[in-house]
Structure formats: structure tokens, C-alpha cells
Amino acid sequence: MNKKNASDGRPMFQTRSIAIGGLVAAVYVVVTLIFAAFGLSSNLIQIRLSEALCIMPCFCPATVPGLFVGCLISNLIAGAGIFDIIFGSLATLVGAIGTYLLRKRRWLAPVPPVIANVLVIPAVLIYGYGINISYPLAALYIFIGEFISCYIFGELLYSLLKRNSKLFQ
């Protein structure tokens, strides 16, 4: 069933998808900036509560670009370095795409954002910000923060969204 927008005949789902993506981007930015104010969303151990939103592609593919744009805007506003703006945002995009691909496997769905960030962000910290730390140790710190964000907070969000999954239909 392809419902049409009464005003111009275009599918309603296109407008709705753009709205959902924009809403996710906005929430990502606001949550990141709130946590940045407390120093939790940057440095070695990064607990970006906004990364919990990376579970949302399990429910709606429109959240994939929303997560990317939200991360990009967050990094720009927070004054991140160019490597973080580019590669950190791309890591979120890759993670969101991976989550969408694994959407039918609840416990595996958060793995792609964790892996993408564990592979990318240590290099950003070392080469982009000049932090003197070994790559494996930086990866461990990033893993801890991403695990907390994507698995603990992401699971809470997943449970909440699952109970209200009609929002995305």
C-alpha cells in the first residue's frame, strides 16, 4: 500500500522519512552537546549517550542519514578537529548502516557502531589530536565508552522503541 500525500500526490513516506531523519539528527546533536558540557562525549573514554541512537536503524532506515548528519553537526558545533568531523562522522554512518543490515538480530545490531568507532576514533585521537597513547589502549577506552552507549543505553532505547514500534510504521 502506497499512501499518497493529498497535496501533491507524492508518497507520504518520503516526507515522513525526512522528518524522522531530521528528528534523529536533532536529538543526536542536543544529547551530544549536553553530555559535552559535562566532558563525557570527548577525550579517551567517551560516553556519548547519543550513540545509543545508533540502535534506531533497527526500526527505521531513515534514521541512518539522520545519525550521520547529527554526528557531523555535533562535531562541527563542539569544535572537533577536521579528522574527527570527517572520520568520526563516517564511523557513525558505517555503524548505522551495519545496524540496519543486522536489524533482525537484536544482540548483534549494536556491534557495527562499536566496531566502527573502535577502529576509527583511536586514530583520530592519536593523529588528529596528538594524544600520546598506544592505538590498542585508545581502542580499549573507546570500546568501553561505545559498549556503555550502544549496549547498555542502546538496549534501554531498543526496549522502549520496541514497545512503541507503531511509531515507525
Image: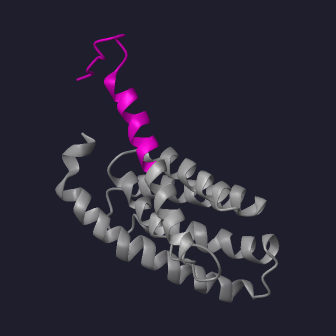
The residue sitting at 77% across, 59% down in the picture is 82
How many discs mark residues in the rendered view?
Answer: 0
Identified at 58% across, 83% down, the residue is: 45
Out of 38 and 144, give the one closest to the viewer: 38
Q: Position of residue 126 (x, y in %)?
A: 78, 78
On the question of residue 107 being in view, the answer is no
**What is the image's colouring?**
one colour
- In the rendered view, tell whether residue 69 sits above or below residue 123: above
Q: Position of residue 1 (x, y in %)?
A: 23, 23
Relative vertical location of residue 12 with respect to residue 67 in this rendering, above or below: above
- Magenta span of residues: 1-24
Q: Position of residue 128 (x, y in %)?
A: 79, 70
Q: Is residue 165 visible?
A: yes
Let me know if residue 68 is in the magenta part. no
Q: Nearer the viewer, residue 9 or 129?
A: 129
Residue at left 52%, top 64%?
Answer: 32
Quadrant housing residue 151: bottom left
Q: Is residue 19 above or below residue 108?
A: above
Indicate the quadrant where residue 4 lies. top left
29 or 133: nearer the viewer = 29
Q: Quadrant of residue 90?
A: bottom right
Quarter of the image with the C terminus is: top left
12 drawn magenta: yes
For the view shown, which residue lies furthest in the front direction? 37
On screen, residue 10 versus residue 76, left or right, reads: left
* Residue occupying image coordinates x 56% and y 48%: 69
